[in-house]
Amino acid sequence: MNNSNVVHGLPINGKHNGRPAIEALAGGSFLASYWYARPGSNKIGKQVDQAIELVGEDEIFFLDNGAFTAFKNGISIADDAAYLDGYFDWAADVLKRCPQAVAIIPDVIDGDTADNRRMISEAIGSGIDAERLVPVWHLHEDFDYLKDLVEEFNHIAIGSSGDYWKVNSEDWKCRIAKMFGFLDALFEDDEFAAAYVKPRIHMLRGIAVMDAWEFDSADSVNIAVNHNAQKKRGEDLDAFRARVETKAKNGHGYADPKLGTIAEIAEEIAAWKLKRIAERDAALVEDNIINFKAAA
């Protein structure tokens, strides 16, 4: 068993022991997609607010941009300025209220490196702290781009794409093995290892394979979609969750432990901002004193 995060996709509907089913996931990790929270198509209801209250102290609340769902519907969000602005505003609001939250940078699933670099630039330009942004490296993209992301971010999501679209196919497993081999080779270089830390690796749609690889976290909607059917088979939501999470946590993560938890990073950012504000205010006071003395 390890401290990896098993991330449950929302929304989850129905009841458990007379209470909303989401409450049975208390203390865990969540993923909410803006695709379901956006104005005019709010299928997620109050569950974002509930997840903020229910997420565990050392867990993660992923804010997903909805690119995958849009892609399955033949839609690209990459050039929809109104959608992107709405996502960044929504994510920024949740990030302020939830120290465990991180925002997945909008991505072009079948795009190239230039497309996704543009998305990173837009995300950073949104004003969200880079430490709370998670870029997506797609399995069809080159490893040089993955190296760039390791140098720029401490948290990277992996997206299945191209010839590696189907999670756990033979091609997918071969590509994932090469990815981890590439990462290991990077950090076997003493100079590189001294300059950078092993990032958190999140596998999108990957809970089912989490135990077989060094993923620090993975998500799926398995619990949300199937808990009612499992109940009819005699397995209630508590037992279903325990079984899924126990299997997923049989693996071990990749990240350097010194990264700390998501909440700890958020607290460090907040403390740094307060320090900068105090320094700025002190400098303004000093300038005013100097100006006053000069005028006298």
Image (cartoon, rainbow, N blue to C red):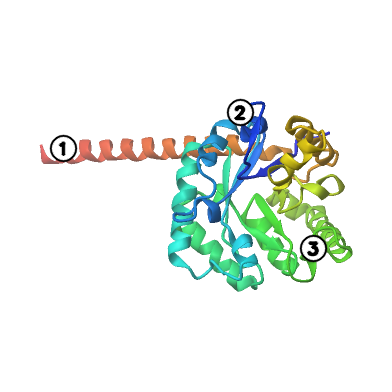
Q: Quadrant of residue 73?
A: bottom right
Residue 258 rendering spot, x and y as whole percentages: 69, 38
In the picture, which quadrant includes the N terminus? Answer: top right
Alpha carbons under labels 3 and 1: distance apart: 69 Å
Q: CA distance from mark 2 to mark 1?
A: 64 Å
* Residue 215 horizontal/vertical position (percent): 77, 47
**Residues under numbered marks 3 and 2 in contact, where contact means CB atoms less than 8 Å apart:** no
Q: Which residue is mark 2?
A: 19
Left or right: residue 99 compared with residue 215: left
Badge 3 element: loop
Q: Amino acid at mark 3?
A: Lys
Question: Is disc 1 placed on a helix, strand or loop?
Answer: helix
Disc 3 vs disc 2: which is toward the camera? Answer: 2
Q: Earlier in the sequence, mark 2 or mark 1?
A: 2
Which residue type does callout 1 highlight? Phe
Look at 15% across and 41% down and name the residue there: 294
Q: Please give the residue where the numbered disc 1 appears in the rendered image.
A: 292
Q: Amino acid at mark 2?
A: Arg
Q: Is residue 256 among what the camera can see? A: no
Residue corresponding to mark 3: 166
Quarter the C terminus occupies: top left
In percent of the image, x 60 and y 45: which residue is there? 11
| 155 on left or right of 177 | left
Label 2 packing within 10 angstroms: few (<14), some (14-19), many (20+): few
